[in-house]
Amino acid sequence: MDDKNKNNNVSLFEGWAFGKTNYIIFTVGLFSLILGYYLMASGSVNSFQSLTLSPILLFLGYIIIIPFALVYREKIDESKK
């Protein structure tokens, strides 16, 4: 049993799929959501801000930016291997 555990001793962050770029993109998506909800709440009911701009920011955050941050992988340079 000890031999199996020694061979599979991988650190949590060595096998971690997310890199610094993923976290930056995810943070941009979260700021897009926060800004979209803020603009929706602060604008009047029939304003451009709450009817057009805010839904566009929310759509970008939920449908494009955050999923992109989850699936993005940096290219591995084969010459460094």
Image: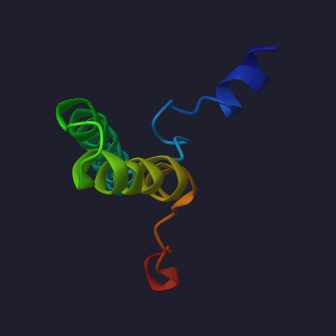
**Color scheme of the displayed model:** rainbow
Lateral position of residue 36 relative to residue 62, left or right: left
Residue 11 in view in this figure: yes
Q: Where is residue 57 in the image (x, y as percent from the top left)?
A: 35, 53
Return the residue nearer the eye: 80 or 58: 58
In the figure, residue 33 lies in which quadrant? top left
Q: Seen in the image, is 63 located left or right of residue 8?
A: left
Return the residue nearer the eye: 69 or 31.
31
Q: Position of residue 20 (x, y in %)?
A: 32, 51
Residue at 46% from the left image edge and 80% from the top image edge: 77
Residue displayed at 35% across by 49% down: 51
Residue sitting farthest toward the top: 1
**Picture coordinates of residue 47, whole percent (x, y):** 24, 48
Classify 59 as above or below 9: below
Number of numbered callouts drawn:
0
Residue 67 visible, this angle: no
In the image, is 28 to the left or to the right of 7? left
Q: Residue at x 47, y 49 (%)?
A: 66
Which quarter of the image is occupied by the N terminus?
top right
Residue extending furthest bottom?
A: 79
The location of residue 76, given as percent across then percent down, is 49, 73
Residue at position x 28%, y 50% from top? 28
Query: Which residue extends farthest right?
Result: 1
Compared to residue 21, the image places residue 1 above or below, namely above
Q: Nearer the viewer, residue 59 or 19?
A: 59
Q: Residue reaching furthest left? A: 42
Residue 56: quadrant of the picture: bottom left
